[in-house]
Image (cartoon, grey):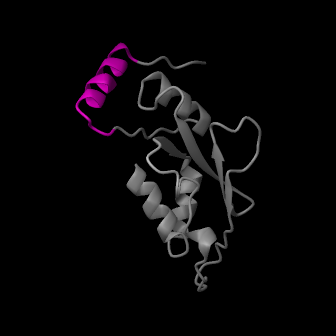
Amino acid sequence: MENKLKPVTQQTIATLNSCKIRTIMATGDNTLTAISVGRECNILDKNQEVFFGDVEERRLVWKSSKVLNDERVDTLEANDIEDKEIEVDDFTKNVPWDGIGGQDFGVALNGSTLAFLNKNKKTYAAVLHKVLFKA
């Protein structure tokens, strides 16, 4: 099954882009499908790097659209035990796009990853802020 873009979508996104209006997409699709659709409708440039986060074994894992295999861009330790003070270290403050300068990039999260960050917002406050600021 394939959902095609509505004919007006690309024109609307082009108008928003020309007016310098930042566009974000919220979807229930698989993260890689969402990135593909974002490129198809020009929310993302065709060759733009996209960092996408996922939760694997209670860890926040970042991957890059430029990495062709399953290599991790950055792995952040996670401890989602509720009601426990967690010392914030560099792993809970950094994101893979820190320090890349003026390079344009996209960020994609699936619903479970956003829920994980929200649930652990005391620990991942800096990461959550950087993700939301980019959006």
Total marks shown come to: 0
Residue at point 67% right, 51% down? 73
Q: Which residues are magenta?
A: 6-22
Q: Is residue 19 above or below residue 99?
A: above
Residue at point 48% right, 22% down? 40
Residue at point 45% right, 32% down? 44
Of residues 56 and 73, the one nearer the viewer is 73
Residue at point 43% right, 41% down? 26
- Where residue 81 sits, quadrant-wise, is bottom right
**Can you name the residue that lies furthest to the front here?**
101
- Where residue 19 sits, quadrant-wise, is top left
Residue 34: x percent and y percent?
53, 33
Of residues 102 and 63, the one nearer the viewer is 102
Most frequent secondary structure within the magenta stretch: helix
Whether residue 41 is in magenta: the answer is no
Q: Assign the N terminus to one quadrant of the image.
A: top right
Residue 119: x percent and y percent?
54, 68
Q: Is residue 34 above or below residue 113?
A: above
Q: Is residue 88 above or below residue 7?
A: below
Left or right side of 99 for 43? left
Residue 68: x percent and y percent?
73, 34
Left or right side of 55 for 21? left
Residue 116: x percent and y percent?
58, 62
Q: Is residue 49 above or below residue 57?
A: above
**Can you name the residue that lies furthest to the left here?**
19
